Image (cartoon, grey):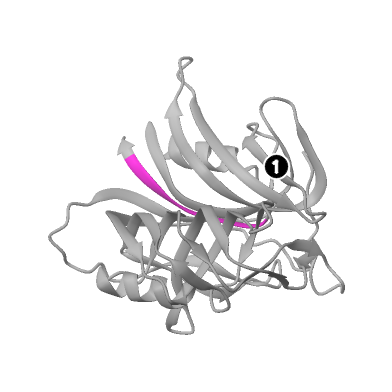
Amino acid sequence: MRSIQHPGQPSLQRVAAQQVELEPFELELPGHMSLMQAVAQSMQGIGAQCATFRMQGGGFEPFSYVMPALAKTSAHAVYFSDTYPVEGAVRLETASVTFGQRDGKPWLHSHAIWIEASGRRHCGHLLPDDIQVNHPIQAQGVAVRGATFTVCPDGETNFTLFVPLKSRARATQTPRSKGYALRVAPNIDICTALETFCRERGITHAKIQGGVGSTVGAVFDDGRVVEPFVTELLIRNGDVFTNAAGQTQAQLDVSMVDYKGGVSEGRLARGQNPVLVTFELALEVLNA
């Protein structure tokens, strides 16, 4: 399994977790405002300071994005590309979003697949303040109650990253399910991390809500390999369950972009996909 050497010392806690309650929602993000404004307004409407969700449909204009990139200095092991502007409107296929707080204000982290006016289908890291929603977008996921993904400095990677911090759960009448808000650190296989986490807590079935992260290249379960080692990805669908052999198994279907601009999709092979910088998600417990 490949690994990445970051500039700082690895923290002892490789999986940061907070037990939470998850409140499902479906809503439409309004148009004619930035993505950040549309999400913040919608989350305020349901009284959520934190959520993980997926977006589909609708689109953006103007639109720009960044991709993962090689680092230009020793301050980081990897970094972001320059900003790529896109001419014309783009149609959103799907995106995964972590919504939380940065410096006491709403912030989000999102990786997406979209289709440009030229017909090109691409993947990358959305710039929430810079892109404008031009057609309403459907959002479905969970409000996270009892913890908030909060941007914090990370000594290992030298980035500021979302970490789940305990917060007060807001009282509502909406039914909730039990779950966990998770951040997985570098050089741990993402499937193994989720399987171990669930097995240690007696969780036999869980659904992954959201899912935004990066891996050191990728290996898919059909044998395909993404050789460029700097990637960013989104989980399109994910579960942790007990298989026929009685073992805990994570199943993650993803879309990703590598630093050379290649887009790859498939199911991650278990035990072969270490986290590059970070991985955020909510784990909804269905049966424990």
Which secondary structure type mostly characterizes the magenta part of the structure?
A: strand
Q: Is residue 168 left or right of residue 112?
A: left
73 left or right, relative to 113: right
Q: Is residue 45 rendered magenta in the image?
A: no
Please say whether residue 93 is visible from this viewpoint: yes
Q: Is residue 56 above or below residue 147?
A: above
Quadrant that contains the N terminus: top right
10 Å crowding of disc 1: few (<14), some (14-19), many (20+): some
Residue 259 rendering spot, x and y as whole percentages: 79, 56
Q: Position of residue 142 (x, y in %)?
A: 33, 55
Residue 130 in picture, x, y percent from top left:
58, 78
Asked if residue 281 is among those painted magenta in the image, a careful observer would answer yes
Q: Is residue 15 visible?
A: no
Residue farthest along the left direction in this orientation? 173
The furthest residue to the top = 245
Question: Where on the picture, by quarter, is residue 127?
Answer: bottom right
- Against 214, residue 59 (above or below) is below
* Residue 44 picture quarter: bottom left
Quarter placement of the C terminus: top left
**Mark 1 belongs to which amino acid?**
Ser
Based on the displayed image, in which of its 4 quarters is residue 255 positioned? Answer: top right
Q: Position of residue 158 (x, y in %)?
A: 71, 73
Q: Which residue is mark 1?
A: 264
Residue 257 versus residue 103 in the image, above or below: above
Front residue of 24/276: it is: 24
Q: Is disc 1 placed on a helix, strand or loop?
A: strand
Is 42 on the left or on the right of 220, as rendered?
left
Q: Residue 27 or 235: which is nearer the viewer?
A: 27
- Range covered by the magenta-colored residues: 277-285
Numbered disc total = 1
